[in-house]
Image (cartoon, grey):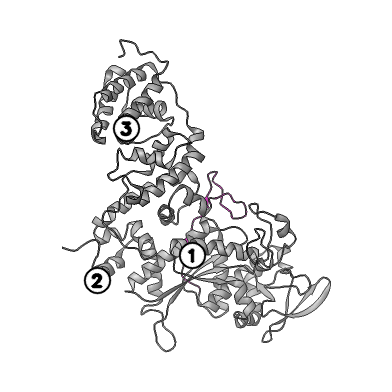
Amino acid sequence: MENPENPAPLDLLTASQTSKAWPFEEARKLVKRFPGGKRDAAGELIPVLFETGYGPSGLPHIGTFQEVLRTTLVRRAYETLTGGHPTRLIAFSDDMDGLRKVPDNVPNKAVLTEKLGHPLTRIPDPFGTHESFAHHNNAMLCTFLDQFGFEYEFVSASDRYNSGAFDEALKNVLRKFDAIMDIMLPTLREERRRTYSPVLPISDRTGEVLQVPVEVVDAEAGLVRFEDQGEMVVQSILGGKSKLQWKVDWAMRWCALGVDYEMCGKDLTDSVTQSARITQVLGGKRPEGLIYELFLDENGEKISKSKGNGLTIEQWLEYGSEESLGFYLFREPKSAKSLHAGIIPRAVDEYWQFREKLPSQPIEQQLGNPVWHLLRANGDTIGAGDTLPVTYGLLLNLVGVLGAQATRAQVWSYLANYVENADPAAHPALDTLVTSALAYNRDFVAPTLKRRKPEPNEAAALAALDAELAATEDGASAEDLQTMVYEIGKDPHYGIGALRDWFKALYETLLGSSQGPRMGSFIALYGIAGTRRLIAEALEGVEVSAEQA
């Protein structure tokens, strides 16, 4: 019988060819593009090139990170489909762009205000830690990508422009200048047409990236003519003395680097269309790619690096886990999704649900499991027994009862009621989530918790539950405790109504929330004595009539 944890390569290859998981569907575009693999002029197999783009005008956020993750998932799917054909991934930073506005979420804004319009790598770092503002933001991106274990090559636009690596491609833009203008001008408003140029010279006088009309003087020499501070000048665009307009820059890069696959957000749909046409004019072929939906904040607005209205990578990792972040980003890339702290707990628990299923699934189902793709993204393997003994939701309920001042040691003392060998060293993933739960409770849960007093019939039912618990020995199973709770809720004597009303009453009177955990599991975790204390606090000052009891 086949071991589902280590499927035979042939079985994996066969299953991948029919898998409906979106990374495989994307990867099949590349297989069609290169039927026998990507090859050079001599017929030698060469790497398929994947690219992701990053605009370092603001601090990296999850929207930036997700593009690297999702592209990596397609990259690994392609390698699987082809039996291991070579690939490369470039994380490209558009750090030659001129700074258009000062982000809201940076210190020392005056430092940036003085350099508006200058290339991002030629602006001082307001944080005071790096060579420039772009170098700081690039470093933040790379730090997290490294932490997550991605295999990638970081490429800076400034390095390529300044070193002359793009010079030949820039000359080609000048050679095709009129054809590019014919593509772009019909897409622009009349006012914009009067100043538009595919090439943005960088002023020798001010250092600014200029938005001015440009006349080609000598394409082979890279010379253009334009007005700078009222005077017509002739200047080279080579060696870092210019950059290209966004859509032209994207097309030039696809050609110069030989990019085969790049995805982007829905907001760049028009850019893809125009850049693809320019790529053809430049003699190249547009990459394959996926257009994904954008992330929204809790108010339904698009997240933005400059506004800082989305979650930062650091925030997610404070309240959740790396794996849960990857899981949330994997699913349904063509559907818009909210991105705020409130979605983290569910993402954590769903990740572990899928991870627990993975080892026992046949290979066809494994390829549809998000965790299979996430593990493969950075070279991890499926491990038997990868489970979380306590859900994150249950942890949050426990910490919520313990209060905003709860400690890690205190949480682990309660976990001893529920988890075998309750030692942080034996359960590192759980220990990480304990710390995350404490932070999440402190910042989001504790300020909103408010226990209400029970209604008379609810008080009678709580008193009955307390009596049952008093007669129950420590160590009772979560299932037995759950049955006990069920039986009281179903008893018509208390007039509770539907079971959901009984559980809602338990959550609101004992936990201070309208939603909560499986009560049997909570009682087993918090302990019978602790749960009876909660009931006593809820019943304090509430009279339970003899008839109701």
Tags 3 and 2 touching, CB below 8 Å: no
Q: Name the N-terminal-most of marks 3 and 1.
A: 1
| Disc 3 versus disc 1: nearer the observer | 3
Distance from Cα at disc 3 to Cα at disc 1: 50 Å
Whether residue 252 sits left or right of residue 34 in the image: it is: right
Indicate the position of residue 73 as horizontal and vertical percent values.
Answer: 40, 64
Asked if residue 527 can be seen in this view, the reply is yes
* Front in this rendered view, residue 327 or 179: 327
Q: Residues within 10 Å of mark 2 (few under 14, many from 20)?
A: few
Q: In the rendering, at what x and y percent does residue 303 appear?
A: 56, 52
The amino acid beneath tag 2 is Leu
- Residue 107 location (% of width, % of height): 67, 54
Label 1 near label 2: C-beta < 8 Å? no
The residue lying furthest to the bottom in this view is: 42
Residue 246 in the figure: left or right of residue 17: right
Question: Is 350 placed above or below 228 here?
Answer: above
Q: Quadrant of residue 38?
A: bottom left
Residue at mark 3: 527
Q: Secondary structure at mark 3?
A: loop
Badge 1 is on which residue?
263
Q: Quadrant of residue 379?
A: bottom left
Could you say whether the residue bearing mark 2 is in a helix, strand or loop?
A: helix
Which segment did they paint magenta?
286-311
- Magenta span: chief secondary structure: loop
Q: Nearer the viewer, residue 242 or 374?
A: 374
Q: Where is the C terminus found, in terms of image quarters?
A: top left
User: Residue 10 shows which numbered tag?
Assistant: 2
